[in-house]
Amino acid sequence: MKTRHIISLLQDNYTTVKVEFNTNAALTYTYKVLKSDNYKVGDTAIVETAAVPPKLKIVHIIEVHDVPMIDTDANFDYKWLVQKIDRTQYDTIVENEGKFLLAMQEVERTKKKAEIKDHFIGLLGDDTEATKLLENAVIDLNKGL
């Protein structure tokens, strides 16, 4: 056992997670996390890399361990995961924008439909029989949909 892992063995308030980086899903790494942070598979998080100088990178959690998975013979230090990325506000904004765009498309479609109908009714003038034929043709067009 490497002495560098003694602290990990003595701590009780954490577990480990396996993560993959966006750039290379084939490589996975294990990081320490506080149990109280309730990480789940699928969470996106930030870690500090071993690069010199260290860099922050985005990772995806692919495993959450029930108990810490510490290899006491490993020749590296287990790092702490920096922070979970909370996408709640971002996802809500993007969803609301999507709903708005769909509503605007429906407004445009409804407007165009009314313009087309008004155009033909304008061409028909006072011919109520032709107007009725047009209205019935539109009704028939939409049957079975």
Image (spheres, rainbow, N blue to C red):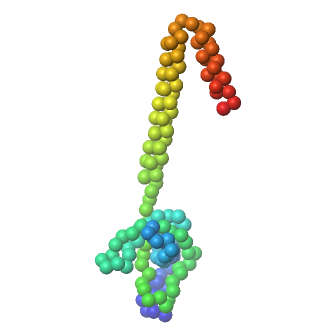
Question: 93 or 118, which is in the foreground?
Answer: 118
Question: 144 or 74, which is in the foreground?
Answer: 144
Residue, far left: 53
- The image quarter containing residue 64 is bottom right
Quadrant of the frame with the C terminus: top right
Q: Is residue 120 above or below residue 44?
A: above
- The image position of residue 135, as x and y in percent, is 61, 17
Residue at the image position 48 percent from the left and 35 percent from the top: 105
Residue at the image position 47 percent from the left and 44 percent from the top: 98
- The image quarter containing residue 86 is bottom left
- The image position of residue 92, as x and y in percent, is 46, 49
- The image position of residue 84, as x and y in percent, is 44, 65
Left or right of residue 87, residue 66 in this image: right
Asked whether residue 13 is in view, the answer is no
Asked whether residue 48 is in view, the answer is yes
Residue at the image position 69 percent from the left and 30 percent from the top: 144
Q: Is residue 67 above or below residue 135?
A: below
Residue, far front: 123
Residue at the image position 57 percent from the left and 7 percent from the top: 127
- The image position of residue 33, as x and y in percent, is 47, 73
Question: For the image shown, how many numbered marks are present on the structure?
Answer: 0
Residue, far top: 126
Left or right of residue 2, residue 140 in this image: right
- The image quarter containing residue 5 is bottom left
Q: Is residue 46 above or below residue 51?
A: above
